[in-house]
């Protein structure tokens, strides 16, 4: 029998709502269109559920948290913040933080993002352990749009009502990142309910962030000029001034999922997201290589990092082949024009770790061309002085993408581990293990 994802006991599992059931019963958006990253390239009208929770947890502490959230929603969140008579937000800190963590953990299990860290909070969510002191929750506010503000450009009739609404009207859960802050020790999640934009900073309890890591987070937050307040055990805060209008907030979300919302995008992105191919195969022509023409290749690769939607589908699937050298007896690493082209391409687009499979040919070839000195028979020597700068560049590129597009900690780690998988694919003459 399977085990419950909250109490870890074996038994029959029930369906747990990711977004509370009460939200769907008369309080859901007027358009009826819902969003989930799992529904690639489209919206849907069903309820988000995940079947991995026992009946005792589902109908007990988790249901109690959802009931608290419903009351809080009805008291504070039904109306946009700048139309309220009072600027105070009152809450039970213990119940609110546990509810936000529960929403985040449910969403994380559905998408596979940040599950490891958030699973450390199961006892907190159930109420059998206290909220750790190093958990932080902040609140920002979204205002209604002004009449005449430009709405997101979507031709999908399912999104027009939401796109043209002046009021914030949604319930979304997902990951976010802070510019200039890279870490594997925090799950950063947001819960956006109409005007209320909660940000949850949940540090790992198993491998806690270092003091330097925590200081980096605090310094990054100090550079964030958006008005916000920290929720405290006192249970009362004054709502901050809105940091964004509803249409700007909606546009930011929709632009990260252009296929689902029928936003402007290339035909290639549309095909990748809707068809979800097993391999993304790109050929580089001999003529491009010998003329050192990078544009054709870089233009295609740049599409892969144009939105979170395409990244989620394309990661781990990219394979590039070099065309036109079948009659050349030399190995590709022995051809100076190929080596030069690949080195130039790596400078222009160093995002191989997230997108390439090290068990296929392209990633080992790139590493060999950058760090190898060719010998006879397709063998090479690793020039150790080039290894660290190359890997540093790849790791920085990976972290930059992770930061910009809220790539999960799990995906970041899997991509980083690809370096160790390169060794068996290389054919060096004598090479120390890749660090």
Image (cartoon, rainbow, N blue to C red):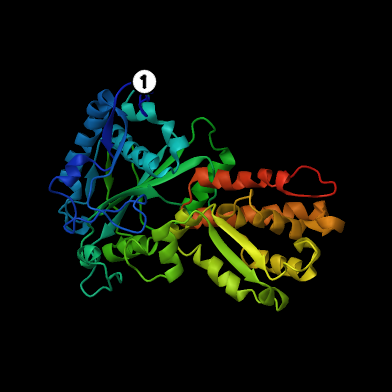
Residue appearing at x 65%, y 57% in the figure: 362
The residue labelled by disc 1 is 9
Residues packed near mark 1 inside 10 Å, few (<14), some (14 to 19) or many (20 plus):
few
Quadrant housing the C terminus: top right
Q: Image quadrant of residue 372?
A: bottom right
Residue 132 to residue 139: above or below: above
Quadrant housing the N terminus: top left
Residue 92 to residue 75: above or below: above
Task: Where is residue 212? Give x, y as percent.
Answer: 59, 42
Residue appearing at x 37%, y 38% in the figure: 105
Task: Where is residue 179? Give x, y as percent.
Answer: 50, 56
73 or 5: nearer the viewer: 5
Q: Image quadrant of residue 19?
A: top left
Task: Where is residue 113? Give x, y as percent.
Answer: 44, 44
Task: Where is residue 137? Give x, y as percent.
Answer: 37, 43
21 or 284: nearer the viewer: 284
Compared across the picture, whether 342 is left or right of 14 comes to right
Residue appearing at x 66%, y 55% in the figure: 363
């Amino acid at each position: 029998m399977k085990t419950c994802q909250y109490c870890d006991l074996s038994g029959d599992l029930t369906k747990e709502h990711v977004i509370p059931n009460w939200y769907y019963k008369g309080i859901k958006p007027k358009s009826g269109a819902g969003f989930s990253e799992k529904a690639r390239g489209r919206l849907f009208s069903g309820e988000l559920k995940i079947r991995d929770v026992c009946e005792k947890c589902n109908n007990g502490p988790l249901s109690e948290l959802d009931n608290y959230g419903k009351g809080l929603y009805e008291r504070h969140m039904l109306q946009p913040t700048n139309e309220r008579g009072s600027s105070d937000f009152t809450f039970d800190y213990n119940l609110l933080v546990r509810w936000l963590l529960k929403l985040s953990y449910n969403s994380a299990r559905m998408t596979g993002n940040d599950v490891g860290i958030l699973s450390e909070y199961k006892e907190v969510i159930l109420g059998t352990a206290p909220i750790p002191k190093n958990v932080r929750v902040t609140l920002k506010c979204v205002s209604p749009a002004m009449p005449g503000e430009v709405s997101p450009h979507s031709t999908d009739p399912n999104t027009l009502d939401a796109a043209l609404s002046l009021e914030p009207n949604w319930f979304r859960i997902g990951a976010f990142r802070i510019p200039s802050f890279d870490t594997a020790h925090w799950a950063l999640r947001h819960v956006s309910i109409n005007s209320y934009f909660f940000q949850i900073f949940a540090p790992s309890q198993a491998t806690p962030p270092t003091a330097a890591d925590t200081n980096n987070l605090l310094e990054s937050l100090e550079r964030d000029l958006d008005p916000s307040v920290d929720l405290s055990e006192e249970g009362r805060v004054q709502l901050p001034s809105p940091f964004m209008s509803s249409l700007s907030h909606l546009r930011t979300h929709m632009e990260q999922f252009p296929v689902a919302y029928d936003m402007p995008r290339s035909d290639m992105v549309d095909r990748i997201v809707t068809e979800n191919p097993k391999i993304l195969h790109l050929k580089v022509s001999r003529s491009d290589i010998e003329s050192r023409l990078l544009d054709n290749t870089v233009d295609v690769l740049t599409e892969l990092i144009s939105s979170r939607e395409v990244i989620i589908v394309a990661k781990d699937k990219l394979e590039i082949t070099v065309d036109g050298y079948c009659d050349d007896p030399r190995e590709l690493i022995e051809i100076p024009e190929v080596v030069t082209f690949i080195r130039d391409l790596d400078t222009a687009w160093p995002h191989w770790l997230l997108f390439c499979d090290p068990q296929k040919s392209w990633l080992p070839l790139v590493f060999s061309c950058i760090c190898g000195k060719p010998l006879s028979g397709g063998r090479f020597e690793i020039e150790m002085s080039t290894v660290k700068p190359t890997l540093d560049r790849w790791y920085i590129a990976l972290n930059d993408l992770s930061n910009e597009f809220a790539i999960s900690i799990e995906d970041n780690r899997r991509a980083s581990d690809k370096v160790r998988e390169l060794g068996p694919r290389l054919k060096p003459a004598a090479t120390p293990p890749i660090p």
